[in-house]
Amino acid sequence: MRDGQVALNDGRTVAFVDYGTPGDTAVVWCHGGPGSRIEPEVCAAVAAQAGLRLIGIDRPGYGGSTPKVGRTLGGWVADALAVLDHLRIDRFVSVGVSTGGAYALALASQSPRVIGTV
């Protein structure tokens, strides 16, 4: 497990956790509300056995991510992509739990890097 933060150009930080191995299929876990980047920990070991690399990302104001006044669902996509760029992940699956489902769909609708959404 790798827990970290990415500094954004607007001065905010985005917290993430990487449960997995580079080269495995990346899965961006979009947490519920309330929730946080550590939600996927419960299934990370089983996912790793299946060749999946779970990436949890805190949305603005959650967990270790800086709040953003006036944030929007679609505006979060740039935050997530900044984390994925930092981790050098080109293609990924987006998964959403509860409220996170809308964020998983936002990723899929705005990024051609998404290869599937659940």
Image (tube, rainbow, N blue to C red):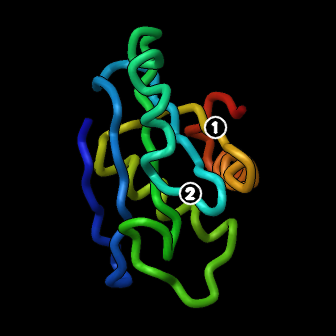
Question: Depth check: 34 or 69 in front?
Answer: 34
Q: Compare marks 1 and 2 and give the one earlier in the sequence.
A: 2
Q: Could you tell whether 66 is left or right of 104 in the image?
A: left
Marker count (numbered): 2
Q: Residue furthest bottom?
A: 69
Vertical arrangement, residue 77 with respect to residue 94, above or below: below
Tell me the quarter of the image containing the N terminus. top left
Q: Could you tell whether 2 is left or right of 45 in the image?
A: left
Question: Depth check: 1 or 78 in front?
Answer: 1
Write down the residue under mark 2: 35
> Image quadrant of residue 95?
top right
Residue 43 in the image, given as x and y percentages of width and height: 49, 26
Residue 36 in the image, given as x and y percentages of width and height: 49, 56
- Looking at the picture, which amino acid does disc 2 mark? Gly
Q: Which mark is residue 70?
A: none
> Image quadrant of residue 114?
top right
Q: Residue at x 72, y 32 (%)?
A: 118
Vertical arrangement, residue 118 with respect to residue 86, above or below: above
Vertical arrangement, residue 7 with respect to residue 82, above or below: below
| Mark 2 burial class by Cα count in 10 Å: few <14, some 14-19, many 20+ | some
In this rendering, the label closer to the viewer, 1 or 2: 2
Q: Residue at x 51, y 83 (%)?
A: 68
Q: Residue at x 31, y 40 (%)?
A: 88
> Image quadrant of residue 90?
top left
Q: Secondary structure at mark 2?
A: loop
Write down the residue under mark 1: 95
Q: Secondary structure at mark 1?
A: strand
* Separation (CA) of disc 1 from disc 2: 14 Å
Vertical arrangement, residue 77 with respect to residue 22, above or below: below
| Mark 1 burial class by Cα count in 10 Å: few <14, some 14-19, many 20+ | many
- Looking at the picture, which amino acid does disc 1 mark? Val
Question: Depth check: 113 or 28 in front?
Answer: 28
